[in-house]
Amino acid sequence: MTRLILAGDVGGTKTWLGLFSPDAARPTPLESRRYRTADFDRLSAVIDRFLEETGARGRVTDAAFGVAGPVEDNASDLTNVPWRVDGTRLGRELGVGTARVLNDLAAMAHALPALGGDELQRLLPGTAPAGPMAVIAPGTHLGEASLHAIGDRRVPISTEAGHAGFAARTPRELELVGALLPELGRVAGGDILSGPGLLRLHAFTHGASRCRACGPDGVPGEATQVTTAALDGACVGCVDALEIFVEALGAACGDLALRTMATGGVFIGGGIAPAILPALRAPRFGDAFHDKGPMRALVGRIPVSVILEPRAALLGAAVAAA
């Protein structure tokens, strides 16, 4: 049987599934579809729908799934969805032996060497030689991972760093953490650098004031309302919220570069960064990225890019399966 890869990118909001041919250095996409995660009660139900719609049932020979949650023993209890994804069970159901389950950011890290051209937007040039790569992705929450060369293999290192404490750097960020502590108990990076985080920033910068740019009741229901109003200059409070977000993201990217010695580049994934490119090109992002004391010169040599390809983690899962 000709090899046919089934790959998945399973998130709290959406689930991408795709079929790939492994007959190239970069697996060739044959078909992909996106589903609302909340419409299903388990991943196998999404897979059944996809295989039925594509006519691929019984033809899959390899499978891998990037999932939004920590992975242990090839299985994961997803962080924002009440699903358990078990690679052994899925492999048995698919008839492929064992399906591979990996953290979604580890899947995205697998894809980094294969991305290029209009799939990336360079923010900071960098001059460092090739080396480890790192990826950070603000979305439903915040994820981070890195990719390292071990012998002739590239090995991703997954983390749950988005749940680590937020490192406030400025008086304004310290004020923000103080405002969020009564609500959250502790403030993690993902509590700020995420879609829900943008809504928290909106509440922080507006206080008791109404935001007419975000609807008649002044309370945005989605982060895109905040970023759109900010980029349009329609609301001073929204501009302020996005500026805090951009600076915090720049600082987090610089911290990730230092933790992983990512001389091969830091990459920003997820759905938020491509939508706010004008704000990320502003000096405040680069200033925060480079503000690393005696390590300023080191991070100054590290390139930073935004991933524009929305299916990067899906591609990475296919790379892992191949």
Image: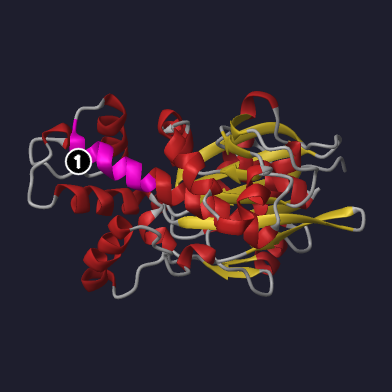
**Residue farthest right in this picture:** 152
Identify which residue is drawn at 61% across, 58% down. 294
**Residue farthest front in this picture:** 294
In the rendered view, tell whether residue 256 sits above or below residue 277. Answer: below
Report the magenta residues as a range.
Answer: 235-245
Q: Position of residue 301 (x, y in %)?
A: 69, 43
Q: Quadrant of residue 295?
A: bottom right
| Mark 1 nearby-residue class (10 Å; few <14, some 14–19, many ≥20) | many
Q: Quadrant of residue 234?
A: top left
Q: Position of residue 83 (x, y in %)?
A: 48, 65
The three-letter amino acid code for the residue at tag 1 is: Gly
Identify which residue is drawn at 23% across, 69% down. 183
Q: Is residue 20 left or right of residue 296?
A: right
Q: Is residue 247 left or right of residue 261?
A: left
Q: Quadrant of residue 50?
A: top right
The quadrant in which the N terminus is found is top right
Q: Position of residue 97 (x, y in %)?
A: 79, 62
Identify which residue is drawn at 62% across, 69% down. 71
What is the secondary structure assignment of the residue under circle 1? helix
Queried whether the magenta region covers residue 244, the answer comes back as yes
Disc 1 marks which residue? 237
Q: Can see residue 203?
A: yes
Queried whether the magenta region covers residue 257, the answer comes back as no
Q: Can see residue 57?
A: no
Nearer-the-camera pick, 273 or 83: 273
Q: Position of residue 90 (x, y in %)?
A: 66, 62
Nearer-the-camera pick, 63 or 78: 78
